[in-house]
Image (cartoon, grey):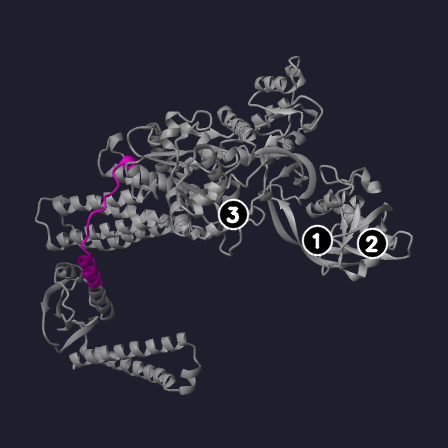
Amino acid sequence: MIPAQFNAATVEKKWYDYWMKNDYFHSKPDNRTPYTITIPPPNVTGVLHMGHMLNNTIQDVLIRRARLKGFNACWVPGTDHASIATEAKVVAKLKSDGINKNDLTREEFLAHAYAWTDKYGGTILEQLKQLGCSCDWDRTKFTMDPDMSASVIRSFVDLYNKGYIYRGYRMVNWDPEAKTTLSDEEVIYEEQQGKLFYVKYKIKDTNEFVVVATTRPETIFGDTALCFHPEDERYQHLKGKTAIVPICNREVPIVFDEYIDREFGTGSLKVTPAHDVNDKMLGDKFNLEIIDVFNEDATLNSFGMHYEGKDRFVVREEISKELESIGALAKTESHLNKVGTSERTKAVIEPRLSDQWFLKMEDLVKPAINAVLETKEIILYPSRFENTYRHWLENIRDWNISRQLWWGQQIPAYFYGEGKEDFVVAENIQDALKLAQETTNNKQLTINDLKQDPDALDTWFSSWLWPMAVFGGIMDPENEDFKYYYPTNDLVTAPDILFFWVARMIIAGYEYTGQKPFSNVYLTGLVRDKQRRKMSKSLGNSPEPLGLIEKFGADGVRVGLLLSASAGNDIMFDEELCNNGKAFANKIWNAFRLIKGWEVADIPQPESSKVAIEWYESKLQQTLVEIEDHFEKYRLSDALMAIYKLVWDDFCSWFLEIIKPGYQQPIDKATFNKAIEMLEANLKLLHPFMPFLTEEIWQYIAERTPEQALIIADYPKVTSFNAKLIADFEFTIEVIAGLRTIRKEKNIAMKDAIDLKVVNREKVSTYFDSVIMKLGNILSLEYITGKIDGALTYRVKSNEYFIPVSGNIDVAAEIEKLTEELKYTQGFLRSVQGKLSNEKFVSGAPEKILENERKKEADALAKIATIEQSLKSLQ
């Protein structure tokens, strides 16, 4: 027995287990063309959110469709170790257990980190299964797997040996919460309301003060000069003099440089080389002292005097009061300032001087620029992101790839002496020892003399190798998997990691293989709520994805998300979308039950059914061509909408209605078989979007072996279609709609057969007459040359349709009703024409309003003509 209701929860578990048992998701090289996607690896300790739901649904649609189209589909899943985020969670867990990270050795800490990821890692991958994701789970990768880490280390050594990686003392972005450096791309600049403090600096041996505007008075302990523009007349007399920094009373030189903006603030600048990248430039130019006043957690150190140990923002408030009390604060003003914050921890970034590892980017980016912007080897969807991509790559700076963390791949640099340059780079300590012995010409060096750099590599330095490393392409580029699956086909990701990840994967791909890592990049939009707000836990506007699946079914959620998800555009998420998806699933289920509920007999095929089949086959083909075009342009939302309309409108509302047998009558075998064939074609189109529902119906239709499962069926092939047949049916729909309207308005029951006479001025084909007769319950259909009296009438374009009344309606009452309608419409027409004859209105009204009024006039005239004709027929 086919259940009356579609039970999503039961069906989802049943078919996912079945797919897994029969290994449909697993791929291995063979003679087919590969189609490959590598998942954007979510954080190992992450959980499913709405962005993941959208992104992975899109990937699953692409992979399932490729599988149906006969490709060897391979979707590689995996997770990223997410060094900053995961280390922060492990540190917090240790803290709650009374353990300080600093009291542990690196090995002890890593044991805790691995225990944490073993417990919480991979949760998101299990959740993706509930969404229906058909990943090759046998290929699951983690960026800290031994082979993946080995790839990262080999990459570092290779780039170092090529001269791309170097160690330098530079101003970097410091995250005081995570206590690590960040790359430029990991800093988010936000406008924040702050203050501008006007601080008075005494000029030595004078009674004069110079006022300097600063947003950061807590850094005055690191001031090592004052600077003015060389042409600023206000400060010419200060050349050769020195100033006194308030509170610490340190004497600093006064310098002049064209870098200074004379128009900002007071035209003067306090130079703090340790805490601002531009000040560092001035410090280098004038050989100024560098004084770092902050600890790694952004509290003040001993240079901060009595503020030592206090947080920078606390000091900002307190020092302003002290400056005011000693007469060194001229005034404060509100000031809107762009402040750099950590993309991960949200902490305000501190510029900090530090020895770090950098990757030279200038030459590495050239093939990546060329591939996307010139040769179009890689295509971004939508293309508007090309401008963003160009801007970033053409203005790229060297990448700071070292992080002051333990969770991640440890930098393979080994120090053998006390000097900054006393190091070698190698894949392991044994190779490092040989190199160190050769470099120093000291064979007495032992492994105990080597000390590995404690820093870890940036997570993105690991994941930029992802499409290659998951197939072993860095360690063994000649292996079968890598040669077969690489380059991959499609990448589906969010625009906010276009720089972090996408561009860098392209750079790495060309550097290591001379090939693109993928052909197409589909950039999804962000999922927002109905008020266009970004979803977040703090706003309470982010629904629980698994709760949505439980409520609406995985298929319903997938459809709800995708119907509103055009590439690159943000999605205004509303639960009602998922409800629409659930309703669609129920519609398909009920259509299937209707077909299976018919009794089949060996009887002649009605003409109307034969016509309906020919029409629907053409309509299916037309839609298939449309779907192919949408997929080619990565318009998945449009592709789904085309299928939605085909199934809901054309199949359920028209095709099934036409072929449906009369009450308690059987259906002929030929029509029934075609109905099943068309249903199966629909299921194939729908399967990538609604995998569970479609597999359930497919398996109910007939007894199937595992080799006949829908997941590996053949996708419908594009052939030809009869465009005229489709156009003629559109006309037929209007004819039937007119009949239904008249029946409704005149209270003529559907069971009462009527006659229909037609003046066919449009020269429309009579091919669909049998359909009109069946759906309109027409007793006789006759083509005539002129109008007839005593009939109800309506028009479709220039064709006129007459229904002789012959006792079906009260003629007198109908004449009275039509007369009233005529009077009202004539009055409406007069008011519209009054406006249009008013010169003042016509000359002053916008064109859109005029166009609307003219349309009202045309509609009223047409309606009056129809009413008058109806009255004439009845009188």
Asked if residue 765 lies left or right of residue 458, the reply is: left
Q: Is residue 758 magenta?
A: no
N-terminal of the pair, mark 2 or mark 1, is: 2
Residue corresponding to mark 1: 259
Residue depicted at x 62% and y 41%: 345
The range drawn in magenta is: 710-733
Q: Position of residue 6 (x, y in %)?
A: 33, 43
Residue 551, quarter of picture: top left
Which element carries disc 3, helix, strand or loop?
loop
Label 1, residues with CA under 10 Å away: few <14, some 14-19, many ≥20 = some
N-terminal of the pair, mark 2 or mark 3, is: 2
> In whole angstroms, how far apart are the C-alphas of marks 3 and 1?
47 Å
Question: Which numbered circle lies on residue 542?
Answer: 3
Question: Which numbered circle lies on residue 68?
Answer: none
Residue 871, quarter of picture: bottom left
Q: Position of residue 2 (x, y in %)?
A: 26, 40
Quadrant of image for the C terminus: bottom left
N-terminal of the pair, mark 3 or mark 1, is: 1
Dots 2, 3 in contact, CB < 8 A: no
Residue depicted at x 19% and y 72%: 798
Label 3, residues with CA under 10 Å away: few <14, some 14-19, many ≥20 = some
